[in-house]
Image (tube, rainbow, N blue to C red):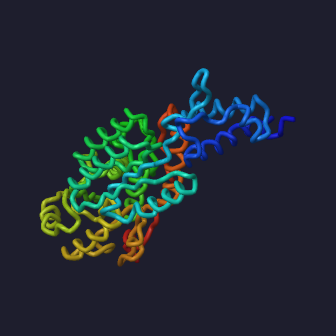
């Protein structure tokens, strides 16, 4: 008798999920025939129709194929039990460590082997070469999919496109972490899991205006990540809307956070003296705060200051830093789940998956504190 689950059309997917897990664990070798429809019917005590639908589901996912006159066989994609993870930023910030840890936990739980390439070089050029080497390893190996955090900077923009092109040619699904490989308003053909940086930038600018800032400035170092470029666009849009005079564009200090001389030159020559600074992340904001101290400017009395990500350093600063919170563990879970969906259905349309990103207001933007 057909079970209730079969009647609902769900049981065949559960069979497919179980068989998929067993394929990844290496239970069925590619050179040997996969269980027949009769074997599936007997094992799961289901009708022939349900057995057929479960095999069709596996074929739709690309993990098995039917060879006329020989039976059902596991495909190369089906036997792929490794997931690659490339996170260049893990060498320079603590932001990605919880993400890497959670993806590794999920991979092991579901029978995948996570291959995390170490990107440890102190130099941007060194990280680029290491990412190239990792991508080559993934292309040559039998990988089910890759989660990739794009490299930042102009050189990184070119490398990102090349690496993803090679992975795509090998039909290896990719999910991008934290940002796209192109800047707003452009859109690549890959899934992106992160936050809506344009919206976050606008929210930061609105808060600074409400806090009394008249001249909001931005700090941009040698590495200009796509995420901050998109936030800058959002903040610029908000500041332009709020401006009572014709908008002439944002005021930007192009310097490293600890470059006191560059800041002094900028402060001396800028037409609108800054009373607020927006930094790309909390670590940079903490370093820049020390530069402001050396220049004789106090936060928040003279200059309001914001960061991004809500790393531990944000709440430990004096004064504590206003920032935007990113749930990194949730980001890892969503990125991993989307990669599994992409592995099962390679023809899914690319999408942006935005995480909640609340503004965490602290004393660094409160002059009355």
Residue 307: % across, % down:
36, 63
In screen coordinates, is 152 left or right of 359?
left
Q: Is residue 166 above or below residue 339?
A: above
Q: Residue at x 68, y 34 (%)?
A: 54
Which sits in the foreground, 337 or 359? 337
Q: Residue at x 42, y 49 (%)?
A: 84
Which sits in the foreground, 285 or 108? 108
* Among the 4 quarters of the image, the one containing residue 262: bottom left
In screen coordinates, is 119 left or right of 189?
left
Residue 85: % across, % down:
41, 52
Which sits in the foreground, 180 or 28? 28
Quarter of the picture holding the N terminus: top right
Q: Is residue 239 visible?
A: no
Residue 46: % across, % down:
78, 36
Q: Is residue 23 above or below residue 260?
A: above
Residue 67: % across, % down:
57, 24
């Amino acid at each position: 008798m057909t079970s209730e689950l079969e009647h609902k059309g769900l049981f065949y997917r559960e069979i497919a999920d179980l068989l998929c897990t067993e394929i990844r664990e290496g239970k069925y070798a590619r050179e040997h025939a996969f269980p027949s429809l009769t074997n599936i019917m007997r094992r799961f005590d289901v009708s022939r129709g349900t057995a057929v639908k479960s095999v069709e589901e596996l074929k739709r996912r690309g993990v098995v194929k039917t060879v006329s006159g020989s039976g059902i066989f596991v495909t190369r994609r089906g036997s792929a039990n490794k997931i690659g993870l490339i996170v260049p930023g893990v060498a320079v910030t603590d932001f990605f460590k919880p993400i890497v840890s959670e993806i590794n936990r999920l991979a092991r739980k579901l029978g995948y082997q996570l291959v995390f390439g170490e990107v440890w070089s102190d130099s941007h050029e060194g990280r680029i070469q290491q990412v190239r080497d990792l991508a080559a390893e993934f292309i040559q190996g039998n990988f089910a999919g890759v989660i990739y955090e794009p490299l930042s900077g102009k050189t990184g923009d070119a490398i990102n496109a090349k690496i993803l092109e090679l992975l795509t040619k090998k039909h290896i699904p990719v999910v991008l972490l934290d940002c796209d490989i192109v800047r707003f308003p452009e859109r690549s053909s890959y899934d992106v899991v992160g936050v809506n940086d344009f919206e976050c930038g606008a929210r930061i600018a609105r808060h600074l205006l409400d806090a009394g800032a008249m001249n909001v400035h931005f700090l941009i170092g040698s590495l200009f990540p796509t995420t901050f470029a998109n936030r800058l666009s959002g903040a610029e849009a908000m500041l332009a809307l709020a401006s009572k005079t014709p908008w002439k564009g944002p005021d930007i200090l192009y310097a490293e956070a600890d470059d006191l001389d560059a800041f002094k030159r900028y402060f001396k020559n800028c037409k609108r003296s800054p009373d607020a600074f927006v930094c790309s992340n909390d670590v940079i904001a903490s370093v820049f705060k020390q530069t402001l101290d050396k220049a004789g400017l106090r936060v928040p009395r003279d200059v309001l200051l914001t960061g991004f990500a809500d790393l531990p350093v944000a709440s430990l600063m004096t004064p504590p830093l206003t920032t935007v919170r990113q749930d990194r563990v949730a980001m890892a879970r969503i990125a991993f789940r989307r990669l599994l969906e992409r592995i099962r259905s390679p023809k899914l349309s690319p999408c942006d998956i935005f995480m909640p990103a609340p503004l965490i207001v602290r004393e660094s933007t409160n002059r009355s504190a």
